[in-house]
Image (cartoon, rainbow, N blue to C red):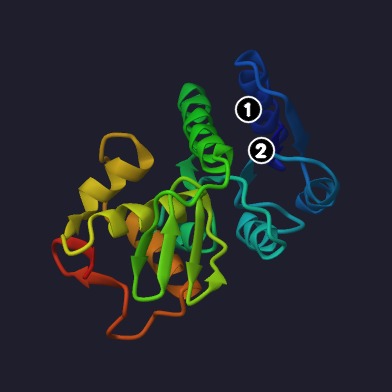
């Protein structure tokens, strides 16, 4: 089920029509609070949230979704183009960000991409044949599990894929462009803000946000590495 939340009825209705024509089941709301009530009782595979809504802004809604433990992909829709807004959305748990006005075919394509990643993330059966271990950090790619010093890390699919890729490339500096294309599976079209925001969120979850992080290290002007 795709959840669409936008107080601009024309936009919400248009997104709904295009997604339904592409074979998706859609549930649409014009108010964030009503959508949150729905999420608590129904299964949602992906949410598309408008940033500017009268009863609750999309950033707050996204944050509440993540705080309540829901890990399905979230795509933000907004007319605001400032980098600080984009970084804020990605940092609090959004997986993608589309600026209005947008091409509806692009929205459908972004939905398909996020769902493929999310389905892959959740499809694997528990397995222990292969795991990556770095100083108490354990990443199990086949089981899609991650622990730090024996404690589970609750990561979104995007965060998990970033961490896995960096662990697989341990000792190598991975450029922002390479990391973006490996995780998002599309040609690099962004500046480094998307990757930077997710790295920041990962470090926060790992409680590794000091000047000298123990795990993910920034190599300025190049990219990121786990030594």
Q: Residue at x 50, y 32 (%)?
A: 116
Q: Is residue 102 left or right of residue 13?
A: left
Residue 160 percent coordinates (x, y): 45, 54
Instruction: Give the CA separation, mark 2 to mark 1.
Output: 16 Å
Residue bearing the label numbered 1: 15
Q: Nearer the viewer, residue 66 or 124?
A: 124
Task: Report crowding for label 2: few under 14, some 14 to 19, many 20 or more residues within 10 A (C-alpha).
Answer: some
For the C terminus, the image quarter is: bottom left
Seen as rendered, the residue at the extreme bottom is 211
Label 1's element? helix
Residue 71 percent coordinates (x, y): 62, 52
Residue 217 percent coordinates (x, y): 25, 72
Q: Pointer 2 and pointer 1: residues touching (CB < 8 Å)?
A: no
Would you say residue 194 is visible in this rendering?
no
Would you say residue 68 is visible in this rendering?
yes
Q: Nearer the viewer, residue 5 or 133?
A: 133
Seen as rendered, the residue at the extreme top is 21
Label 2's element? loop
Residue bearing the label numbered 2: 45
Asked if 1 appears above or below 85 in the picture, the reply is above
Residue 206 percent coordinates (x, y): 46, 74
What is the number of callouts on the image?
2
Q: Residue at x 72, y 33 (%)?
A: 9
Q: Nearer the viewer, mark 2 or mark 1?
A: 2
Task: Report crowding for label 1: few under 14, some 14 to 19, many 20 or more residues within 10 A (C-alpha).
Answer: many
Q: Is residue 220 left or right of residue 10?
A: left
Q: Nearer the viewer, residue 101 or 148?
A: 148
Q: Nearer the viewer, residue 69 or 76?
A: 69
Asked if 99 appears above or below 156 in the picture, the reply is above
Which of the 4 quarters of the picture holds residue 226? Answer: bottom left
For the N terminus, the image quarter is: top right
Which of the 4 quarters of the picture holds residue 202? Answer: bottom left
């Amino acid at each position: 089920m795709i959840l669409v939340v936008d107080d601009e009825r024309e936009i919400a209705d248009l997104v709904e029509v295009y997604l339904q024509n592409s074979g998706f089941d859609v549930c649409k709301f014009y108010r964030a609070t009503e959508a949150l009530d729905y999420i608590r009782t129904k299964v949602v595979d992906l949410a598309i949230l408008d940033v500017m809504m009268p009863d609750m802004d999309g950033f707050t809604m996204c944050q509440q979704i993540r705080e309540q433990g829901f890990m399905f992909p979230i795509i933000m829709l907004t007319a605001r183009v400032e980098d600080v807004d984009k970084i804020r959305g990605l940092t609090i748990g959004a997986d993608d960000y589309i600026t209005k006005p947008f091409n509806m075919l692009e929205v459908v394509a972004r939905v398909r991409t996020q769902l493929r990643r999310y389905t892959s993330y959740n499809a694997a059966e528990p397995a222990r044949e292969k795991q990556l271990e770095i100083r108490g950090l354990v990443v199990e790619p086949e089981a899609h599990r991650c622990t730090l010093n024996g404690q589970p890390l609750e990561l979104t699919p995007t965060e998990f894929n970033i961490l896995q890729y960096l662990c697989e490339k341990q000792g190598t500096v991975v450029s922002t462009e390479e990391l973006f294309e490996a995780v998002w599976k599309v040609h690099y079209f962004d500046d480094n803000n998307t990757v930077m925001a997710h790295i920041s969120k990962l470090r926060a979850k790992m409680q590794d946000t000091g000047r000298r992080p123990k795990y993910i290290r920034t190599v300025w002007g190049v990219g990121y590495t786990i030594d």
